[in-house]
Image (cartoon, coloured by chain):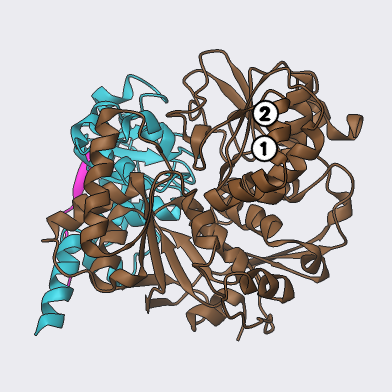
Chain colours: A cyan, B brown
Amino acid sequence: MHVFNTIQAPAVCLGDDIDTDLIIAGRYLRTKDAQIWADHIFEDLDTTLHARLNGCIIVAGKNFGCGSSREQAAVSIQLAGVQAIVARSFSRIFFRNALNLAIPLFEVPDITCHDGDTITCSLETGKVTVQDESKNTMTYQAQPLSERMLEIISMGGLLPYIEKRMSFKAL
Amino acid sequence: MGTLSEQILGAEAGTYIDRQVDRMYVHDGTGIQTKLVWDRLGGKGVKAPYRVYVIFDHNTPANTSEVATLQRELRNFCKQQQFHFSDAGGGICHQYMAEGHVAPGEIIVGADSHSCTLGAFGAFATGVGATDMAGLWALGETWFRVPESIGFHLHGSFSRGAEAKDLALWYVSTLGMDGATYQALEFVGEGCAGLSMTERMTLTNMAIEAGGKTGLFYADHVTETYMAQYGTHCKHQQPQDPIYTREFDVVLDDIVPLLAVPHRVDSVVPVHKYADTELDQVFIGTCTNGRYEDLLRAAEILKGETVSVRTIIAPASRRTYQQALQAGVIDSFIDAGCILVPPGCAACLGTHQGVLGKGEVGLSTANRNFKNRMGVDASYFLSSVTTAAVSAICGVITDPLEVL
């Protein structure tokens, strides 16, 4: 019932417990200008990261997006051009925020990967393939998303999903 | 049926459900982001405005003209929508809600990660982001995955120098920063009866620091007595043969004063390991430790003394402030040389009222010591109120067991 394109992009690898303060610092939050968040993304973690994010897939360790509920963290990742996020695990508020923005998410508890490896992933199958420089490949099965989560992502996020729900209720 | 989360949500752990939410709240930071999303939705017809709360606490009073302009927009929107509204100075959102806007058995969602605090009242309370909150404004309901639960069986009572915050730091370090991800923490056992609502809120507040969806206490006579002052009816709750994924027996008497060291909340050691570390700032307040009982405990230590380091104190709410004023607690702080700032989040989020500078070392009663959070290239430790107060007098990290 769901049709998703396969995503293929180079990996940018991050460690464990990347908190939302590290994704976008509190001092940049108080604005409506979302570009500011994309411009300062990961500034307190690694100032070189920003330039490498466009067109990449983030591959993170466990507990990605822990800490503050700030949705600006997920918005900044999307605006920076990140195609998908693969992580050993996600913090649940970040997970919901990213899902609501229709960012493809893959939870793969045992993934190993290096910067620049080619990642191929599909929401339809939940398969995540890592291909290294020597063309060795390893395929993982991501934790399944619920029907609801897939529906929200396939519709383009929570806003279109709610619009549909509201129009049904109005009938 | 089962754990308190299962009882309130009415379904077994692991199932996905839709539930109407009894109360939903945002603060000035997440509120403006929620309104942005709401406007994109077309901005018509909040489902249940009488269940929506907007509480200004993060940057209050506004610290820049841009922030003031955003707050003005949100304030006007609240009036137009007839939301419950607490302006700058009213206090931290979780504490404001705790003052008569919560009841056992309710489902409460806040656009702030520490919304889990309200689980202290036997409510199912958890945090979401702006888009989820805009969806709640529109529909009045959202989806949940009923969490599995980790059980903490509490026995005995705290001994000299240790308090609820030390237990909170202990469980975060025991579970790790992701040890409770997608799960709820439940505090049960005969040790709960001796814990005040303030202590319970300190414990549930930090569930998120272990990745937890919420932290819960079953409503009992302590909850009932607290609720009575706000005229809220309180039905007692009981565990019903809950099944926990993990269980811990905790003897409160064995808990000692602890510190979370930079830059992880789960890097926890006994205070004496860092004794004599020079401090540039001590901060007492926040949704973890800024309540009246916390301030009273700090004042009992600071009374008649003089702090030897910059010490900032932020009451959690206006009511807290008034209680402290009436009890002479504020006089003790001022006499000791402390700086009082308005009720709210204050220095916790590193944007005003006590931002740390490069190379500075702080000690805070807050819940997060992430890198750069309270100031770029600064480092800070987390502790109990008691440890913070004795350290403020000495100007260096001080183990309460050495001086009390």
Image position, residue B327 (x, y; %)? 72, 47
Q: Quadrant of the C terminus of chain B?
A: top right
* Label 1 residue SS: helix
Main SS, magenta residues: loop
Disc 1 crowd rating (10 Å Cα; few below 14, some 14-19, many 20+) is many
Extent of the magenta region: A1-9
Check the image and report above or below for A162 versus A81.
below
Disc 2 crowd rating (10 Å Cα; few below 14, some 14-19, many 20+) is some
Q: Chain of mark 2?
A: B
Q: Quadrant of the N terminus of chain B?
A: bottom right
* Label 2 residue SS: helix
In the orientation shown, which residue stands out farthest toward the top? B359
Q: Which of the 4 quarters of the picture holds residue B207?
A: bottom right
- What residue is shown at x 33% (from left), y 41% (from top)? A73
Spatial separation of the CA atoms under disc 1 and disc 2: 6 Å
- Going by the image, does B252 lie left or right of B337? right
> Is A152 contained in the magenta span?
no
Residue marked by disc 2: B334
Viewer-closest of B316 and B158: B316
Residue B404's label in the rendered image is: none
Residue marked by disc 1: B330
> Is A5 contained in the magenta span?
yes
- What residue is shown at x 19% (from left), y 32% (from top)? A35
Image position, residue B309 (x, y; %)? 68, 18
- Going by the image, does B46 lie left or right of A136? left
